[in-house]
Image (cartoon, rainbow, N blue to C red):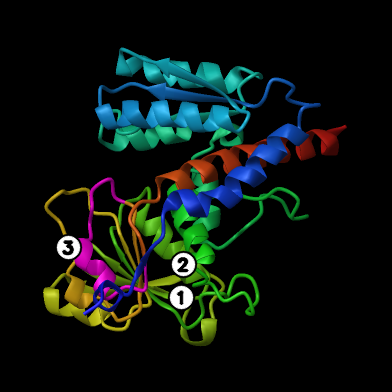
Amino acid sequence: MSVSAVKPGSTILASKISKEYVDEITKKVHDMKDIRPDGPLLVGFLANDDPAAEMYATWTKKTSESMGFRYELRRVEEKDFLEEAIIEANRDDSVDGIMVYYPVFGNAQDQYLQQVVSREKDVEGLNHVYYQNMYHNVRYLDENKQQKSILPCTPLAIVKILESLQIYNRLLPEGNRLYGKKCVVVNRSEIVGRPLAALLANDGAIVYSIDVNNIQKFTRGEGLKFIKHHVEDLGDYTEELMKECCSDADVIVTGVPSAKYKFPTEYIKEGAACINFSSEKNFDDSVKTKASLYVPMTGKVTISMLLRNMLRLIDNSEKLKKGTQ
C-alpha cells in the first residue's frame, strides 16, 4: 500500500500561512515611515524565569525586527514592580505596543495586570473593552465604524488559519461564514479556549467547548437567529459525550498544555481539519490518517496577528487624533 493511501492528510505549517500576513505587515510598516520613521516600538515585559517565555521573547524580537518594528525587552526582576513598569510604558508616547509574558503570578493578579496595560497599547487584545466587544460580536470601537476593535491574538490566529484552509465560506456574508460548520475546541482557558469558541460561534459555527469538568455548546441559535453566541451546558465531561460531539466535527482545535495528552485519532471524522495551538503535541502522527488538513503549531501566525494588532492600534490612534483636530 502506498504512503499516500495510508496518510491522505496534508500537514500545513504556520510559517506558510503567516507569509501572506508577514508581507502585508512589512508593507504597512514601510508605508508609515512618515509617522514612525524608525519603525513602531513594541515593548515586552518579562517578569518570570520561564525558559519558554524567554524563548518567546527572543522569537518576538527577531520576528518583529525582520518586519521593520523596533522591539525592546524590559526585564523586571521583582514581580511587584511590574505594574509600575507597565504604567510607565503606558505614559511613554514613544511606545506603540505593550505585551507581557504570562504567567507572572499565575493567579487572578495576572488578570489584573492585563487591565493595567493601556487599551491603546494592548497588542494582545486582553483589555476588558476588547473582550466585551468580542463576546458580544461588536467589531468596532466607535459608532462610525472607523476604529476596529482588537481581538486576542491566538484566537484570531486560529480564525485566520481556518480562513486560509478555506473552512470559512467566502460566498456567505461576512460574520456568517462558518454557518453549517461544527467545531470542537479542547481547551476553555480565558486567554484562548473560551474566546475562540465565542469567535467561531459568532461567525456562525456550532462549537463544542471541551473542558476537563464539562462540555458546553456555543451557538447563535437555529438559523443564526441571535446576533451573538449563546452557551448551553451539555453536562459533565465523559468520553462518550466527547466522542458524540466529535463524530461529525468539521474542525478540531486542541490546546492542552500536557505532554501526556493525545487527542484520540478514532474520534476524528474522515476529512476534518485539525489544529493544535498547545506548545505540546496534542495529536500523534496517526492524525493524518483521518484529518484532511493538519496544522501542528500556530505560533508564527499568532505573532503576525500580534503585530497586525499593533498596526491597528496605531491606525486607531491616528484616526482619533484627526477626529479631535
Q: Measure the alpha-carbon separation of dots 2 and 1.
A: 6 Å
Q: In this picture, is 182 found above or below 140? A: below
- The answer to if 280 sits in the magenta stretch is yes
Q: CA distance from mark 1 to mark 3?
A: 23 Å
Question: With respect to residue 34, does 217 lie above or below?
Answer: below
In the picture of the structure, the residue carrying the numbered disc 1 is 205
Q: Is residue 229 above or below residue 31?
A: below
Camera-near label (3 vs 2) is 2
- Residue 74 lies in the magenta stretch: no
217 or 280, which lies in front?
280
Secondary structure of the residue carrying tag 1 is loop
> Magenta span: helix, strand or loop, mainly?
loop
Task: Kindly identify which residue carries mark 3.
Answer: 213
Closer to the eye: label 1 or 3:
1
Is residue 126 left or right of 317 when viewed as pictured? left
Look at 60% across and 22% down and name the residue there.
95
